[in-house]
Amino acid sequence: MRWDLARHKVTITLVCVAISMALVVMPFSAPASADTVAAIDMLALNNQMRFAVGAPTVPSDPRLVQAAQNHANYNSANSITGHYETAGLPYYTGYSARDRLGVRQLWDAPYHRLGMMHPQATTIGWGHSGLNGRESTVADLVYDFGFRAVDFVRSPADRQTNIPTSWSGRESPNPLPAGVSGLVGYPIMVVYSVGQSADMRAAEVVAPNGTKLPIYYVPQQFEYDYQVIIPQQPLAANTTYHVRFDLTVVGQYVTNEWDFSTGPTISVPPPPPPVTTLHSVYVSQTTVPSLQPAATSAGRPQ
């Protein structure tokens, strides 16, 4: 993923980003023309996920689809995964992500979810291959930093339900501290638009009883417009959690907080009732008139 240069050269607005998917996140259609059907399904699924977190949906591009398909074929034919290709192997089309626009991972993995949910993504191509009996799915994205559709995107989104309780912790680069492995809580993240830098000051995940969950702070990779935290233990099922990020966004203090649920419904405390009484300082210094409905201050009917 070599797209951090876009953060330093404001004249560059279009950036090609490669995200490769090691697994599919939900079953695809039965393989009648499996590669084509799976690619269409993955585009629809990615847009469903983007829509759910408030990111603009994106169209497909036949050039990206071809690039993704080429690399999916390469991965399957050679029974490998990864971000690069080796010249001379079957279906070789380019060495780096810059050349062929494709890599693989899951939405649940935060560094790869970053690309899939990014508000600057403008088009996408999916490729799927089953060569040699090995399933490979590749997504290629293009970003445009010249527009702002939204200010930020959060995942899980505000009031989003049925969020997974855990994540496997498997991703490269590894977002977890050295020595940590196995199931952890579902990663929580926010991405700001048009390359706005976001520095973490503090964050918390609060359970319904007020307990603050222990979390890992994920180091930024590739860019500086996002922040990620990961609960150290799997979340409880059917539970609403409150999230708070205290950030510095382009030099300004910002608090971003919201709620999500690991169940089908969300339970958020109702807002406090509006204040309908006068302020105590005003009452102590002012004689408050007492009027009856349909009466004037002189007591005569209107």
Image: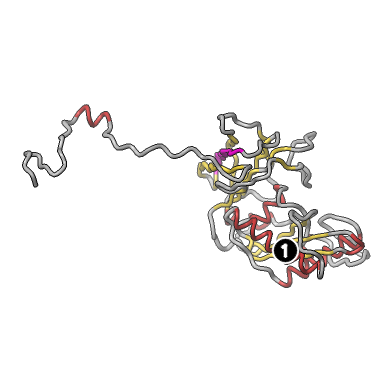
6 w.r.t. 64: above or below? above
Determine if the magenta segment contains residue 84: no
Q: Is residue 101 left or right of residue 158?
A: right
Residue 16: x and y, percent? 70, 63
What residue sits 72% from the left and 72% below the top? 62
Residue type (three-letter) at the residue carrying disc 1? Asp
Mark 1 residue element: helix
Residue 30: x and y, percent? 80, 64
Q: Tell me which corner region of the image, top left, top right, bottom left or bottom right, holds residue 300.
A: top left
Q: Which residue is at the front of the view, 138 or 94? A: 138
26 w.r.t. 207: above or below? below
Q: Tell me which corner region of the image, top left, top right, bottom left or bottom right, holds residue 231.
A: top right
| Residue 8 is at least partly visible in this image | no
What residue sits 75% from the left and 36% below the top? 177
Which portion, as a residue range, is magenta? Answer: 239-248
155 w.r.t. 14: above or below? above
| Furthest-top residue in this view | 284
Q: Considering the whole magenta stretch, tell me its main secondary structure.
A: strand
Count neighbours of disc 1 (C-alpha within 10 A) and say few if under 14, some if 14 to 19, many if 20 or more: some
Residue with the mark numbered 1: 41
Q: Is residue 295 left or right of residue 5?
A: left
